[in-house]
Amino acid sequence: NPRGGACACLADGEHGYWGGAFCDQCQAGYLAPHCREQSVAIALTSDVHILMTDARYGNGTSAVVLDAEHGLLYLGGMPLLVLRSSDKALVAELDLRGMVRSGSVTRTAVALCVQDPDTQDTRVVWLSRGDTCSVQS
């Protein structure tokens, strides 16, 4: 503000979630350059040993996608496990007919890149966010 007053930074899905003294930086948890997409943590399950102790939930090469806002972890794919990140309690178990290889969290959904174990083809599977997650058609 040229008159010395404070500015209010834009903070919505259309314009982005901006912060900083000059509203030229993304708010914590949002990715540049547009500050619209949330930052997510992705790791191979072989790096998260505590989560993958049962062999029927994957082959150790599934990605782990974190939805920090809802406190959920997505991993596996055959079936997909949705766990609360705070206590690792099972929230949902969904059959995606393939393993999660990567993913991202948007304002309204979780997009998972799922690889078919037979053909090795990949496809995007969209899930609704939150404790009542389900596959979106």
Image (cartoon, rainbow, N blue to C red):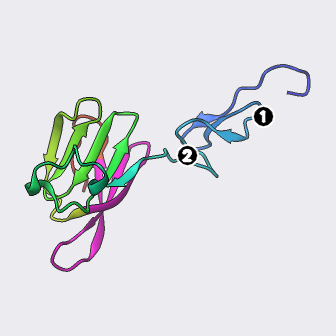
Work out whether 105 lies above or below 103. above
Residue at the right extreme, as displayed:
3
Residue 84 in which image quadrant: top left
Marks 2 and 1, Cα distance to the nearest angstrom? 18 Å
Q: Among all residues in the image, which is located at the extreme top?
A: 5
Name which residue lies at 19% across and 80% down. 119
Residue at 43% in and 47% down: 40
The residue nearer to you, when weighing 34 against 47, is: 47
Instruction: Report the span colored magenta.
Output: 100-127
User: Which amino acid, mark 1?
Assistant: Phe
Q: Which disc is residue 22 wearing? A: 1
Q: What residue type is disc 2 on?
A: Arg
**Mark 2 neighbour class, 10 Å CA radius: few under 14, some 14 to 19, many 20 or more:** many
Q: Residue at coordinates 26% horizontally, 77% vertically from top-left?
A: 121
Q: Quadrant of the N terminus?
A: top right
For residue 13, what is the image quadrant? top right
Q: Pick the quarter of the image with the C terminus.
A: bottom left
Q: Which residue is mark 2?
A: 36
Residue positioned 60% across, 34% down in the render: 11
